[in-house]
Image (cartoon, helix red, strand yellow):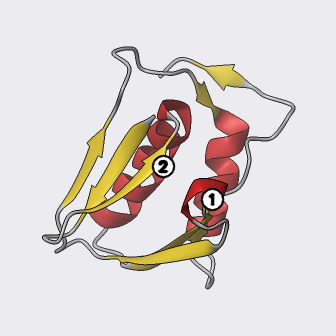
């Protein structure tokens, strides 16, 4: 499990390394363009099984901490789905990886 650590109050959210890698690509692309947006995900059962959202802004510190040392392969279809979500009026909504996977190493 890796972590996305956000803001000066160090909000820490855990994600699997593979998920975190995909999120890093999508989030970095939006923030590099100086675009703010909501990022939403479903909470795991251990923290209440609800839903959470963050307002992602280029001026707020962001840190990606991975548990493993290897960069996971990238699913082009999942990346496209997450990117489309991030560019929508709802913002980035974390979805499960599509079952039909067209993976490629970065």
Q: Residue at x 34, y 32 (%)?
A: 66
Residue 33 position, x and y percent, is 31, 67
* Residue found at the far left of this picture: 8
Residue receiving disc 2: 23
Residue 34 position, x and y percent, is 28, 72
The answer to whether 101 appears left or right of 36 in the picture is right
Q: Residue at x 35, y 51 (%)?
A: 4
Relative height, residue 24 to residue 106 (above, below): below
Instruction: Say whether disc 1 or disc 2 marks the residue closer to the N-terminus.
Output: 2
Q: Residue at x 61, y 44 (%)?
A: 79
Whole-angstrom CA distance, mark 1 to mark 2, is 8 Å
Relative height, residue 86 to residue 95 (above, below): below
Q: Are marks 1 and 2 in contact (CB under 8 Å)?
A: yes
Residue closer to the observer: 82 or 45: 45
Relative height, residue 2 to residue 38 (above, below): above
Residue closer to the observer: 29 or 3: 3
Q: Identify the element where label 1 is drawn.
A: loop
Q: Residue at x 31, y 65 (%)?
A: 31
Q: Quadrant of residue 28?
A: bottom left
* Residue found at the far bottom of this picture: 89
Q: Quadrant of residue 83?
A: bottom right
The answer to whether 97 appears left or right of 66 in the picture is right
* Residue 94: image tag: 1
Q: Identify the element where label 2 is drawn.
A: helix
* Residue found at the far right of this picture: 100
The answer to whether 13 appears left or right of 98 in the picture is left
- Which image quarter holds the N terminus? top left
């Amino acid at each position: 499990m890796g972590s996305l650590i956000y803001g000066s109050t160090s909000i820490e959210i855990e994600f699997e390394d593979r998920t975190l890698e995909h999120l890093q690509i999508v989030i970095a692309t939006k923030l590099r363009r100086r675009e703010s947006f909501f990022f939403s995900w479903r909470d795991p059962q251990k923290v209440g099984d609800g839903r959470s959202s963050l307002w992602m802004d280029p001026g707020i510190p962001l840190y990606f901490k991975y548990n493993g040392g290897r960069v996971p392969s990238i699913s082009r279809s999942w990346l496209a789905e997450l990117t489309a979500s991030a560019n929508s009026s709802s913002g980035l909504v974390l979805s499960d990886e599509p079952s039909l996977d067209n993976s490629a190493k970065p």
